Amino acid sequence: MTARSMYCQLLLLPGLVALAASATAHDSGRQYPNSSWEFGAVLDAAHTSKKLELGYRDKNLGLGHSDLMIRGPLGAAFTAEGIFAAHTVDDRLETHTERFVLRSRNLPGGLSLAVGRFASQIGYLNEQHPHADDFSERPLLYRGFLGNHWFDDGLRLNWTAPTPFYLRFGAEAFSGKQLIKEAETKPKIGTSTVSLKTGGDLNQNNSWQLGLSYLNNRRQAEVHTHSEGESAHEHLHGASFSGRRMWMTDLVYKWAPDGNPKNQQIRLIWEQASVARIHPDAAASLRHSATALAAVWRFRPAWELGAKTDWLRVNKPEREEDGDPIEFGAARLREHAMMIAYKPSHMQTYRLQFSRQRADGADAAEVFANPVRNVVMFQVVLGFGAHGAHSY
């Protein structure tokens, strides 16, 4: 399917969603008189002047994280949700099942359970859909360590404490196949996470949230043989840089007059990650690390300005030929972005973004072969039907 024909089909989504929702609401009403099933769709398209290093958007016109969603109750005990996503890679349309999850309802003691395929809750952005982000591309932290948006097959157990402030503990176990596509070790439980989220209101105008996450990865990535001119962004699916252990910290601060963000709001987001034991042959001191800082200002009800800066430091394991000893290429990648977004409603976003990259380090040319000087993106996000709740 060509990109042009795919765009034409996606323009039909509003009518299809409305028709399906009408028909299914009648059927589901008979089975669950107090609840109904919901349908929704999101179209994310952008025109990009150049492809960013580690970027997830094609040059020129391309489809970003677009999806079809269905969710609803399964009796009184469970809720089911499915999300089927599509995007373009090198002008080819790729589709996948992003979410197919069964969640518990009304478990006692603040517990909640999820099983199936879903996005991990580590970090601040990962559980959020990319089309809901403040910028057209995620920070290098996510693009390099989590394959941009890490979802996987697994099990999650959360406990929300009965405290006057928000406090949630979570644990997850995954196959890990979506994070490490090509692995030398393949245990049934390939990855697991534990996380903590806490936050609250400082006063009527100010609020905050802190997150701490730990990821244990038992799927050791295969070491690629060096190919001249190859760069990390050619392996778009799964993590480009991985290790046995990863720690993540995120801190979010929000300000809004009288706690109402409709007319004015300031959002400050800081995230940091460190990856250790990047390979059995690597010295313990060799690590991957990344930091991202973003600020967004809603200065009018429908307008936002934002700036983002992030850094990525890696030591990429690679060999010249099969059988050769593994060498570790040290490199750094920096990226800065500015954007202005027009949001006439919560279902529409029109964003203009300017980004710039710079790579350096002893082996920068081998690790990051194509950093771009200047990139201009224009992104359009349109939602139809039901949509997920916004995260903090």
Image: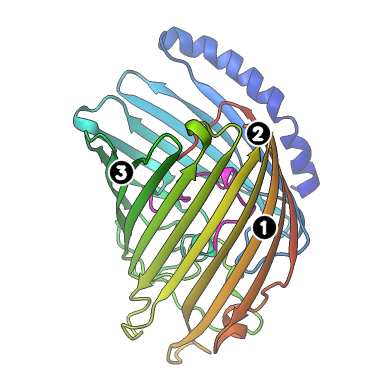
Name the residue rendered at 74%, 36% in the picture. Answer: 9
| Spatial CA span between label 3 and label 1 | 36 Å
Question: Do the CB atoms of the residues marked 3 and 1 lie less than 8 Å apart?
Answer: no
Q: Residues within 10 Å of mark 2 (few under 14, many from 20)?
A: some
Give the SS element for disc 1. strand
**Residue 219 x, y percent position in the rendering:** 35, 66
Q: Residue 201 lies in what quarter of the image?
A: top left
Rendered image coloring scheme? rainbow
| Spatial CA span between label 2 and label 1 | 19 Å
Residue farthest to the bottom, as pictured: 324
**Residue 356 x, y percent position in the rendering:** 68, 68
Name the quarter where the C terminus is drawn: top left
Tell me the residue that label 3 is attached to. 156
Name the residue rendered at 36%, 78% in the picture. Answer: 279
**Residue 329 x, y percent position in the rendering:** 50, 85
Q: Does residue 183 belong to the magenta stretch?
A: no
Among numbered discs 3 and 1, the one appearing first in the sequence: 3
Among numbered discs 2 and 3, the one appearing first in the sequence: 3
Name the residue rendered at 52%, 43% in the picture. Answer: 97
Tell me the residue that label 1 is attached to. 338
Viewer-side residue, 198 vs 189: 198
Q: What's under tag 3, amino acid-wise?
A: Arg
| Spatial CA span between label 2 and label 3 | 37 Å
